Amino acid sequence: MGMTVVEKILARAASLPAVVAGEVVEPQVDLAMSHENAALVINQFQEVFEGTGLTAKVWDPARIAIIFDHRVPAESPKTATNHKKIREFVAATGIAKFHDIRGDVGGICHQILPEFGYVRPGFVVVGTDSHTTSHGALGAFSFGIGATEMASAWALGIAMNIEVPATIKVVVKGVFPPFVGPKDLILRLIGELTAQGANYKVLEFHGETIRKMSTSGRIAICNMSVEAGATSGIVPGDEETVRYLREEAGVTDAIDCVTPDPDATYIRTVEIDVSALEPQIACPHMVDNVKPIGAVVGKRIQQIVIGSCTNGRLDDLADAAAILRGKKVAEGTRMLVFPASSKIFGQALDKGYIQDFMKAGAVVMNSGCGPCLGVHEGALGDGETALSTTNRNFKGRMGNPKSEVYLCSPVVAAASAITGVITDPRKGA
Amino acid sequence: MAKVIIKLENDISTDDIYPGRYMATVLPSETPQFAFADRTDFNAKLRAKAFAPGSIIVGGENFGCGSSREQACSTLKGHDVAVVAKSISRIFLQNSINLGLQVVICPDIGASVGDDLEITEDHVVNRTTGKTYDQVKLPAARKGIMDAGGLIPYTRARLMATRS
Ligand code: SF4
């Protein structure tokens, strides 16, 4: 019987000839990623060794990545002390893939991993972050786990008791109309599947639209697959994957793309044609409360956010800058821009996008998660509304349960910044 | 038998259970104070230990969706409550098992605040209404972790076996 991409990856990683959905396996981990919550992982890791008489040693320091992004630079003494504790652990353990708070190699974990070529097709990637699904964009099986499970992976090098997920095949065809792109596609799909429609399952993306999509766009759709409950999203590795890893991530060693068998078993197939897709908006307070933009045009916005692991990459900034160039952010609206990594920040500087944003009145912040999870800069006031290119709009997500968050693409965010109300970019801003 | 202390809607996220602004607090000994912090009345009652140990939170579908933050489980575990929900998000379920937080998937559960529930091996019995509901059983492999008392002792045993 044929296997899906994830079944093939898990079979290899568990040294089995074949696996089927529902089976429980213990795959070897190729890459284990954490961010600031490594502070908790370290705590749990040390507890594993308590009373064993064994020295607390990680299975392979070369396969562990730690990236500071959620609260950078530290917003509180508590965070700063967590950072310090992690730095000391990293130094003592010899973890090489460590990205501290830096303006050259810093950034959001889900941007750093692809950017530095840490992820390859066929890898099993675990991360203590639900958006670890992002790395399926490079053909890896990549999923979020908790801190204790990560401690276990650090100790043993395997992911514990993984149920081989069933796979939903998503076939996307058609050419995106102007001002519509990958973010609208994934929002639309989440609206259709619902927030738990893909729970315990994998979304495997296929079709001409996906084949033509850049790795950046693929990251956006795999990133948000978890918002439909998916264990992971995955785009089987192809020419674009190899191009990205070689040209943008500087990978020189062999790249082995894993593709599904033609007779693989899918529990469901979803087909989407994007040729008539409209800009999509996720309305408060659920990511699956998705509406075509027409339903919410004119809604007053106090804060626009462009950034995050979903839409803070160079193409996102380019699209937004093109709309804002020579224009002004509306009075009564503030706009915050967070490039996803220092590298992207530098590229956006070279291309003039940062100037475009600043001249328009936007505030450009250091790369990192910023206001996405409501612990750092950019909190909302009572009764305020944000329009954001991030991936979650749960009540309180931007730090205030008395505020609202709408989610959209970078072009919608930019067009709306100029007017101060949700604006359809197709109508000309 | 234990009382239902709150009944929640569908899609309760980990941001709701443990708001992001408290994420710098990580130790299981410190997280309980922030359980459902934005539901101030409920949070105050939890902190005041107004509920008997083993009391039950009834959730709807997709309980624990969103962020993988393990604090959402340790914060509940710290109050010694159990969760009975119609369905549970993958990472939250796994984290609960790993930390030994009692979670029960019960797709048809019908219960109101104040009802007495009895969680048996395969069912949840609502003693107040007299109705019995089926549980969705966890895969055997997951049960192994629960039986070991959580993932830390489970991993410790594995480690001893591989390194000795
Ligand atoms: S940008 Fe937001 S969603 Fe992405 S890793 Fe950071 S907090 Fe999570």
Image (spheres, coloured by chain):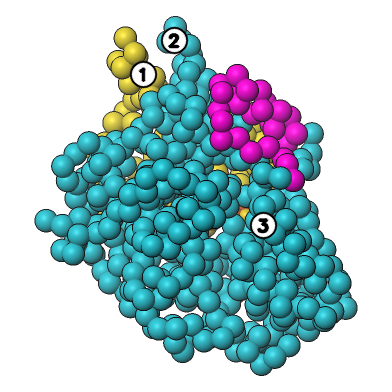
Chain colours: A cyan, B yellow
Left/right placement of residue B31 relative to residue A10 reads right
Relative to A212, say whether B152 is above or below.
above
| Residues at discs 1 and 3 both on one chain | no
| Ligand 1 within 8 Å, label 2 CB | no
Give the residue at x 59% y 83%.
A179
Distance of label 1 from label 3 (alpha carbons): 41 Å
Q: Which residue is mark 2?
A: A54
Q: Is residue A338 magenta?
A: no
Q: Which residue is mark 3?
A: A344
Q: Which portion, as a residue range, is magenta?
A: A78-103
Relative to B1, say whether A107 is above or below.
below
Q: Is label 1 in a helix, a strand or a loop?
A: helix
Give the residue at x 62% y 50%.
A108
Q: Quadrant of residue A174?
A: bottom left
Numbered badge on residue B159: 1
Q: Amino acid at mark 3?
A: Ile
Q: Is residue A80 magenta?
A: yes
Closer to viewer: mark 2 or mark 3: 3
Closer to viewer: mark 1 or mark 3: 3
Give the residue at x 49% y 82%.
A176
Relative to A279, say whether A65 is above or below.
above
- Percent across and percent down for residue A192 are 41, 75
Distance of label 2 from label 3 (alpha carbons): 43 Å
- Percent across and percent down for residue A65 are 54, 37
- Percent across and percent down for residue A55 are 48, 11
